[in-house]
Image (tube, grey):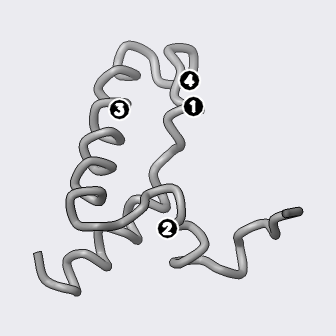
Amino acid sequence: MNTDQLTALKIAFTYMPQAIDVTKFEYGNEYQKTLDHINYVREVLIEAGQDPDKLQGEINPNATPNSCY
C-alpha cells in the first residue's frame, strides 16, 4: 500500500461509525455486516502500522476533543 492509499484509508476510517454505535436497532439486519467491515478496516490499518484509535486526532485535529490527562 502506498502513502496515498494509506492516507485515503485513514480518512475513510475516521468517517466510519464507531463499533460501539452500531446496533441492530440503528442498522437493522445489516448491523453485523457493518461491524465486520469496521473490524476489517481496523485490521488492515493495524497491519500497516497504524493505531486506528489515534487516527481521528491525526486526520481531524481540530475536531478531536482535548484530553483531560
- Occupied quadrant, residue 51: bottom left
Badge 1 amino acid: Ile
Badge 2 amino acid: Leu
- The residue furthest bottom is 3
Residue drawn at x 49%, y 35% is 19
Identify the residue position indicated by label 3 in the image. Answer: 34
Q: Distance between the residues labelled 1 and 3?
A: 11 Å
Counting residues from the N terminus, which is met first, the one under dot 4 or under dot 1? 1
Q: Residues within 10 Å of mark 2 (few under 14, many from 20)?
A: some
Comparing labels 4 and 1, the label whose residue is closer to the camera = 1
Counting residues from the N terminus, which is met first, the one under dot 1 or under dot 3? 1
- Occupied quadrant, residue 36: top left
Q: Residues within 10 Å of mark 4 (few under 14, many from 20)?
A: few
Q: How far apart are marks 3 and 2 (CA)?
A: 19 Å
Badge 4 amino acid: Glu
Counting residues from the N terminus, which is met first, the one under dot 3 or under dot 4? 4
Badge 3 amino acid: Thr
- The residue furthest left is 1
Quadrant in the picture for the N terminus: bottom left
Identify the residue position indicated by label 2 in the image. Answer: 55
Query: Which label belongs to residue 20?
Result: 1
Comparing labels 3 and 2, the label whose residue is closer to the camera = 2
Q: Secondary structure under badge 1?
A: helix
Identify the residue position indicated by label 4 in the image. Answer: 26
Quadrant in the picture for the C terminus: bottom right
Q: Distance between the residues labelled 3 and 4?
A: 11 Å
